[in-house]
Amino acid sequence: MKKEQIDFEYEIEWTTLSDYLYFLQRRKISCNVASFLGATTVREYVLGLENKQPTPKQLDQRRKLVERENARRRLGIASALEYAPSYYATTES
């Protein structure tokens, strides 16, 4: 993300939406947000962008991420299976 910054440069201190919202709050930026958790985001976070299937350990890591984010009151999980890396997934993964 830092390499993609063009007009403004800032430190990226977050890896989750909750961390990002806290980042904004500390800078006194008002926000009113309701969000879905992106299935692609979870896959990319654990597996990267490659065309590969998760190991049982990686699948468990993804489940735990979803559980954690659901506990933070996400609206649900959004999927867009026509975009990489999501279309690499099978029904089981």
Image (cartoon, grey):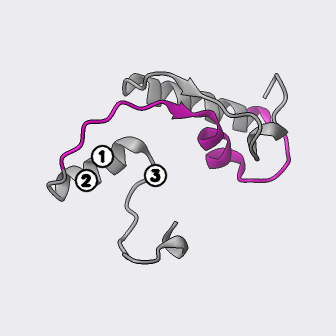
Q: Say which residue label 2 marks.
A: 24
Q: Is residue 4 left or right of residue 48?
A: left
Looking at the rendered structure, the kind of residue marked 3 is Thr
Which residue, given by chain and number where applicable, does mark 1 sit on? 21
Q: Is residue 13 above or below residue 40?
A: below
Q: Residue at x 63, y 35 (%)?
A: 61
Q: Is residue 41 part of the magenta span, yes or no?
A: yes
Q: How crowded is mark 3: few (under 14 residues within 10 Å), some or many (20 or more)?
A: few
Residue range (magenta): 30-56
For this view, does 34 lie left or right of residue 82? left
Write down the quadrant of residue 80 in the picture: top right
- For marks 2 and 3, give the CA distance: 13 Å
Question: What residue is shown at x 66% (from left), y 30% (from top)?
Answer: 60
Mark 1 or 3 closer to N-term?
3
Q: Are marks 1 and 3 in contact (CB under 8 Å)?
A: no
Q: Nearer the viewer, mark 1 or mark 3?
A: 1
Amino acid type of the residue tagged 2 in the rendering = Leu
